[in-house]
Amino acid sequence: MVKVKVDTLELNMYIDGQWTKSSNGGMRSVINPATGEEIAQAPEGTVEDAKKAIQAAREAFDTGVWSEVPAIERAAFLLKVADKIDERAEELARLETIDNGKPLREAEGDIADAAACFRYYAGIVTKPDGETYHVTDPMQAMVVREPVGVCGLIVPWNFPLLMSVWKLAPALAAGNTVVFKPSEVTPITPTKLFEIFEEVGLPKGVANMVMGAGDVVGDAITESPDVDMISFTGGTKTGKHIMKKAADTMKKVSLELGGKSPNIIFADADFEVAVDFALFGIYCGSGQVCSAGSRILVEESIYDRFVDRFVERAKQIKVGAGLAEGTEMGPLVSQQHLEKVLSYIEIGKEEGARVICGGNRITANGYDKGYFVEPTAFVDVNQNMRIVQEEIFGPVAVIQKFSTEEEAIQLANGTKYGLAGAVFSNDGAKALRIIKKLRSGITWINSYHPTYNEAPWGGYKESGIGRSLGTHGFDEFQEIKQININLQVEPVQWFEK
Ligand code: NAD
């Protein structure tokens, strides 16, 4: 295995334009999941830190230092951020890899997408966005869009920089101020992004970053009456908690949550293409992707052949440290998450499902300190099993069989989630017919996973509320104001003199 020694980074939070430690001096170790070694020390933020950040964001919003900056200037700022991300792409990708564990080629893709996301929203913000309405004379009605105010942005660890950018770029483009919390597990690249914000001269207080535990810092942000909106990406359980807490102050909420997405493969699909995308759908990111195609539904007539070929290919996937040459799949993000994924593999076995490949932790070749798991697949499953119903968020697929379109749809929609889904078929009408029946927000035909800054991302059912990306993702960070103008200014004469 490749030994990558890096000096331990000392991270700080960014509050009101200042790099700060935790108010109680607490720190948290950040671990490289490939080696189990400490790579950074991060401040363990407190409620007091969160309050300071919220106050700074509130003041910055209320004084208009950002919301009243002309859109073209905000766009110029976003473009500079994008350029700086590009300039530092190599450094950022390596840091993402040692923090999250993902193979370098995945991290490089994320960093490029992050820069592109800033450019996309820099473009959007200067485009026409108002509306006028044909109401009764002499009135003229129109609508303008305004920033929501102070936005609390809370993100997970699976795409540390990219998930941050999916929120920060549209929120800032729209003129909001923000209190941002990265995952406590992966705070490194978000810190680098805030260094870039400082470098390009974002006014102080506009973007604040507080690190730390969800039930401390996250709760403080969600509960605060000075925060107008919460945009959250993470698990469904946390999302429900946030929604309940946010209700007390009637915050706007946008929730991007978990998934258990179906990948439906018909006998008339291009067989090798379908196998290839099925592998990519579940094992990319070690299965730690919200949209992962973790339920592979295969038409009966090709089921056995499909399983054989899938297993043959899954066994060839090169699992290793993200920085090691040739690595195709990295470790899981943390010891805690490793234990969760391994426990689901045991649950599957106890439920009577059969492991057809993988199923074990990898400790050979010096990987015993890292959190590596083999690409794993179960067969002989039924719809009621926990491994079919619950999000495992690891490299674990279930491969199910169907015989009719109706059955495929029923199985596909048969969980509480509704994030993503795909259909593989060379019958275009059938593929679209099935897609239209899927209760999912993100779908693909003859593909899996591609995501675009231009197109809305989000789920149905317990996979969330609202959308990220595209113009819909921009709408989330805006209020709509109706303005009615009287074009003939004379008394209404409703009451007699
Ligand atoms: P998580 O819900 O445990 O944590 C996400 C974030 O929420 C972290 O920053 C965490 O500190 C914070 N948090 C935890 N408790 C909180 C609380 N009480 N109040 C406020 N914030 C709190 O999720 P995770 O394990 O970091 O990420 C994995 C999950 O994220 C998976 O379920 C995955 O599907 C989901 N996810 C969804 C999308 C999407 O676009 N739908 C994208 C990426 C990840």
Image (cartoon, grey):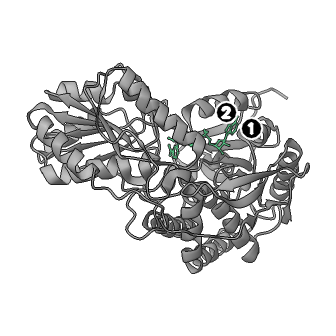
Residue plotted at (47% across, 67% down): 104
- Taking the spot 71% from the left edge, 36% from the top edge, the residue there is 251
Residue 233 image position (x, y, % from top left):
58, 44
For badge 1, the amino acid type reads Thr
Based on the displayed image, in which of its 4 quarters is residue 177 positioned?
Answer: bottom right
Q: CA distance from mark 1 to mark 2?
A: 7 Å
Q: Which residue is mark 1?
A: 222
Left or right of residue 3: residue 242 = right
Question: Amino acid type of disc 2?
Answer: Ile
Q: For residue 486, say whether it is visible.
A: yes
139 vs 43, nearest the viewer: 43
Mark 1, other Cα within 10 Å: few <14 / some 14–19 / many ≥20: many
Q: Which mark is residue 242?
A: 2
Residue 485 visible here = no
Vertical comparison of 453 with 240: above or below: below
Q: Nearer the viewer, residue 200 or 492?
A: 200
Image position, residue 83 (x, y; %): 58, 78
The response on whether ligand 1 sits within 8 Å of label 2 is: yes
Q: Quadrant of the C terminus?
A: top right
Picture quadrant of ligand 1: top right
Give the side of residue 378 with respect to residue 67, left or right.
left
Q: Is mark 1 within 8 Å of ligand 1?
A: yes
Residue contact at pointers 1 and 2, CB within 8 angstroms: yes
Along the line of sight, the residue nearer the viewer: 148 or 392: 392
In the image, residue 385 above or below residue 9: above
